[in-house]
Image (tube, rainbow, N blue to C red):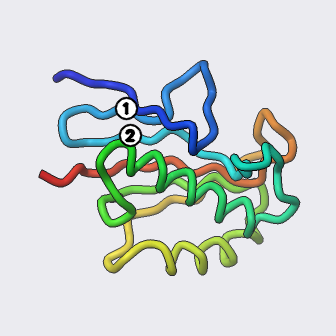
Amino acid sequence: MPRHAVRTERAPVNPRYSQAIVAGNLVFVAGTPGLDVSTGRWPPDVEAQAENALKSLGEILAEAGCSYDDVVKLTVFLTDPSHGARVAELFARVFSSPPPARTSPVVKGFPIPEALISIDAIAVRPD
């Protein structure tokens, strides 16, 4: 199955890996952090970081020919389990019903200490 990388400057770029890979009609989006791409800064609160991560996710999905409605699976990595409820409220406003399947593991931290959240996703591209 042929595959190709997706890249947009409207989301955080890491030269060590692809923002997403399209394989057939599936899109695999790498962990998308809460960095504010317009300023290059990390907001201090998880809500702002979650909004940034979702915005970046949306930009990557759009570059791959998808939208939030095409997401079937999310993994939301959090550094603090108490952030789960606040992030879930935001997700409920972004994802239509039925919402994607989701897991939310709590991690000790990320390579960048300011990061509080990272989101990866699997989407199905529309025919």
Q: Are marks 1 and 2 in contact (CB under 8 Å)?
A: yes
Q: Quadrant of residue 44?
A: bottom right
- Along the line of sight, the residue nearer the viewer: 39 or 51: 39
> At x 43% / y 35%, what residue is drawn?
20
Q: Which residue is mark 1?
A: 21
Sort mark 1 into few (<14), some (14-19) or many (20+) by Cα contacts within 10 Å.
Answer: some
* In the image: residue 84, left or right of residue 93: right
Checking the image for residue 127, the label placed there is none
Q: Quadrant of residue 23?
A: top left
Sort mark 2 into few (<14), some (14-19) or many (20+) by Cα contacts within 10 Å.
Answer: many
Above or below, 59 against 97 in this view is: above
Above or below, 124 against 89 in this view is: above
Mark 1: which amino acid? Ile
Q: Position of residue 103 (x, y in %)?
A: 51, 59
> At x 31% / y 25%, what residue is drawn?
4
> At x 47% / y 56%, what residue is drawn?
58
Q: Position of residue 30 (x, y in %)?
A: 51, 38
Sequence-first tag of 1 and 2 = 1
Q: Could you tell me which secondary element the residue under label 1 belongs to?
A: strand
Q: Position of residue 32 (x, y in %)?
A: 59, 45
Checking the image for residue 28, the label placed there is 2
Q: Could you tell me which secondary element the residue under label 2 belongs to?
A: strand
